[in-house]
Image: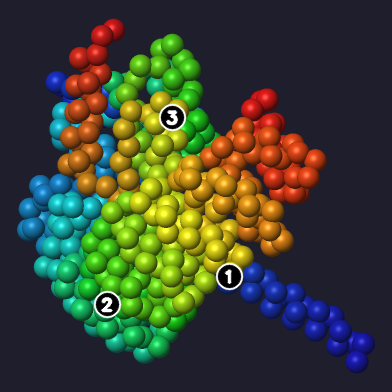
Amino acid sequence: MNETESSKGLILVADDDPDIRDIVSFRLERAGYETAQAANGDEALNMALERPPALCILDVMMPKVNGFELVRELRGNETTQGIPVLMLTASVQDKDVARGFEIGADDYLKKPFNTNELLARVAALLRRGSSSPA
Amino acid sequence: MTAALPEVALGLAAATLGLLLLLVGRRIYLARGERRRLELEERVVPLALELVSGDLDQGRAEALSNLEAESLATVLQRYGRVLTGEDHRRIAQFFERSGLVEQEVSLLGSRAAWRRALAAYVLGDIGSPQAVAPLLEALGDRSRDVRAAATRGLGKLGADEAVQPILRLMARGEVPISTGSMALLDLGPEALPGLLELVAGGSTGERLAAMQLVIELGDASHATILIDRLADDSPQVRAGAARGLGRLGSADATAELRRALADPIPDVRAAVASALGKIRDGESVELLLRQAGEREFTAARSAARAAGEIAPQRVIEEGSRRDAGPHLAEAADRLSERLAW
C-alpha cells in the first residue's frame, strides 16, 4: 500500500496483470490518491472489507473471484455497497459491458486504455459519489 | 562376455549420472538467468513508469547499461500492449529515438520466418508510425505467421490504409479470419470507408467478411448498404445481410426483408425471418405464419419463432389449433412455457 500525505482518497486496484496494477497505481499516486493493489478478486474483496476504499478499479477476468462476481459481493455487503466501481475490460463485446452495468458497476474502460481518460473517469466517479445524498 | 558385463553396467551408470548432472546444471543456469532477468526488469519498472508518464529525463535512460536498456525495452513493449493515446506515443518515441524501431524493421528482412514474425509482432506493440510502411510490405510475406503478425501490428498502429489489404488476405485465407477481424476491430470506425467499398465491390469472400465487420463497427446508418446486399448473387451474402439488418434493428429495411422472404434459398429465408422477428415488424406476421408451414425445416422453424417474437398470443392461438404445423406448435409451446414462467 502506498500512502501520500495529502491523499485524495484510497483507491483499490485489482488486476491479475502486474503491469496494469503498476501503471494504474503509479498514475493515481502521481495524481494524489492513495492506492492498494490486489492480484485477484478474493484478495480484493478481503482488502475492501478490511479497509473500504473510496473507489475500486477492477479487471473483469481475474482468478478465484472474477470482476463481475466481485462487484456482486461488494454490492451485497453493507460496508462496501456504496463504493463506486470502475471496470477495466479487455472484452470488446457490448454484452459484457452491459452485464457489468446490470450487476452494479458505475463505469467501464476498455483495454488498452489511456491513463488520462482513466484519471478523468476516477475523478468524475468520486465527484458524483461525494455529491450524491447519503 | 559375461565377465565384461559389470564394466558395461558401471559405464552406463556413470553416463546416466553425468547426464543427470548436466541437466541439473542446465536447470540451475536457466533459473539463475530467469531470476537475473526478473531482477533487472524490476529495477527498470520505475523508469518505465516515469517514461510513460512523460516525467523521465532522456539522459537517465541513456545512462543505462546494455542489459538494463534491454530490460527497459521489454517492459515498455509490454506496457505498449495495454496503453493507448499519449502514453503509447511516448513509448513509440522512446523506441524511435533509441534506434530500436529501425532495428526491428531491418529484422523483417531476416531469413528465418520466426524472426520476421517476431519483429512484426514487436513493431505492433511499439506503435511507431514509422513501422506502417514496412508492415504493409510484410503483409505480402511468404510466411503465414509473418503475415498474421503484420496484420495484428497494423491494427494496433491504427493504419487505416491496411483495411483493404487485410480484408483481401482474409478472404483468400492467407491470414486467419480471427486475426484479421481483431485487427480491423482495433482500427474501429476508421476502417469503415474501406470496408464499405469492399461490401459493394469485392469478391464473394471479401463482401462477406467486410459485411460482418460493418455490422460490428457500424450503426443503423449503414443499413442501406446491407439492404442492397439482400439482392446479392451469393446466398451467403444475402443471408449475412439479413442477419446484419436484424442485428442493427433496422426498421427502414422491413419492406425489403418482407420481399426477401420469397428468396429461393431456405437458409436465406431463415435469416430473413429471424431478422424480421428481431425488428418486431408487425406487418410481416401473416407472411411469417405462412412460411412457418413450409417444407424446409430451418426456414419454417425460424419463421414460427420470429412470428412468436412479434405476436406471441397470435402464435399461441395458431399453434394450438389441431391443423397447426409442427413448427408453429413448437413455437406455441415455447411461448406458453415462457409466459407461465
Alpha carbon separation for disc pair 1 and 2: 44 Å
Chain under numbered label 1 = B
Number of residues whose C-alpha sits closer than 10 Å to that of mark 1, classed few (under 14), some (14–19) or many (20 or more): few
| Quadrant of the drawing holding the N terminus of chain A | top left
Q: Is residue A91 visible?
A: no
Have a look at marks 3 and 2 and say if they share a chain. no
Q: Which residue is tagged 2? A: B135
Identify which residue, B45 or B123, lies in the foreground: B123
B193 horizontally vs B121: left or right: left
Asked which quadrant contains residue A109, the reply is: top left
Q: Is residue B279 visible?
A: yes
Number of residues whose C-alpha sits closer than 10 Å to that of mark 2, classed few (under 14), some (14–19) or many (20 or more): many
Have a look at marks 1 and 2 and say if they share a chain. yes
Q: Which residue is tagged 1? A: B264
Position in image of residue A91 (x %, y %)? 41, 48
> Looking at the image, which residue is at 26% across and 79% down?
B136
Number of residues whose C-alpha sits closer than 10 Å to that of mark 3, classed few (under 14), some (14–19) or many (20 or more): few
In the rendered view, tell whether residue B216 sits above or below residue B107: above
Alpha carbon separation for disc pair 1 and 3: 42 Å
Asked which quadrant contains residue B142, the reply is: bottom left
Identify which residue, B145 or B234, lies in the foreground: B234
> Looking at the image, which residue is at 64% across and 69% down?
B20
Secondary structure at badge 1 equals loop
Chain under numbered label 2 = B
The residue sitting at the right extreme is B2
> Looking at the image, which residue is at 40% across and 73% down?
B207
Residue type highlighted by circle 2: Leu
